[in-house]
Image (cartoon, helix red, strand yellow):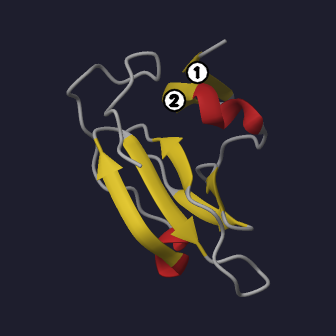
Amino acid sequence: RGLSGPRPDRWSQPGEGVSFPQGPWVQTASDVQLEGNHLCARMRRPDGFWGSRDCVFVQAGQTFDNDGGKFRVQTPTGLPGGTWITTARNIRREGDLVYADLRK
């Protein structure tokens, strides 16, 4: 299945690429493809079998983990946990406050 390239509704603008994202997912991945900000791979599941192809939209500076054969964004140290991180960009911390642009 071919990729259509970066989607403008996922933060990055058309034609804007990101660096290859790091994290533990790399050690259990196969068939990896990064086109623009669209990353796809098959990752090994806990049962030892390969999961189906999973895709995510990558933002600059994000790192990922393998969560049962699916991508999961790693929360940077010092930030509160939760799903907010998956739609956040321009994250910064000032003292006890966290600032970020969030997508609806």
Query: Whole-percent x and y of residue 101?
Result: 54, 16
Q: Residue flagged by tag 2: what amino acid is it?
A: Ile
Which residue is identified by label 2?
A: 91
User: What residue would you read off at disc 1?
Assistant: 99
Q: Residues within 10 Å of mark 1 (few under 14, many from 20)?
A: few
Image coordinates for residue 67, horizontal then vertical, percent: 71, 64
Q: Secondary structure at mark 2?
A: strand
In the depicted structure, whether residue 47 falls above or below residue 102: below
Q: Position of residue 40 (x, y in %)?
A: 46, 54
Q: Residue furthest front?
A: 1
> Which secondary structure, mark 1?
strand
Q: Quadrant of residue 98?
A: top right
Q: Is residue 13 left or right of residue 23?
A: left
Where residue 70 sits, quadrant-wise, is bottom right
At x 71% / y 76%, what residue is drawn? 45
State the residue in front, 51 or 89. 51
Compared to residue 51, the image places residue 95 above or below, namely above
Is there CB contact under 8 Å for labels 2 and 1? yes
Viewer-nearest residue: 58 or 1: 1
Q: Position of residue 48 (x, y in %)?
A: 71, 87
Q: Earlier in the sequence, mark 2 or mark 1?
A: 2
Q: Residue placed at 61% from the left, 56% from the top?
A: 71
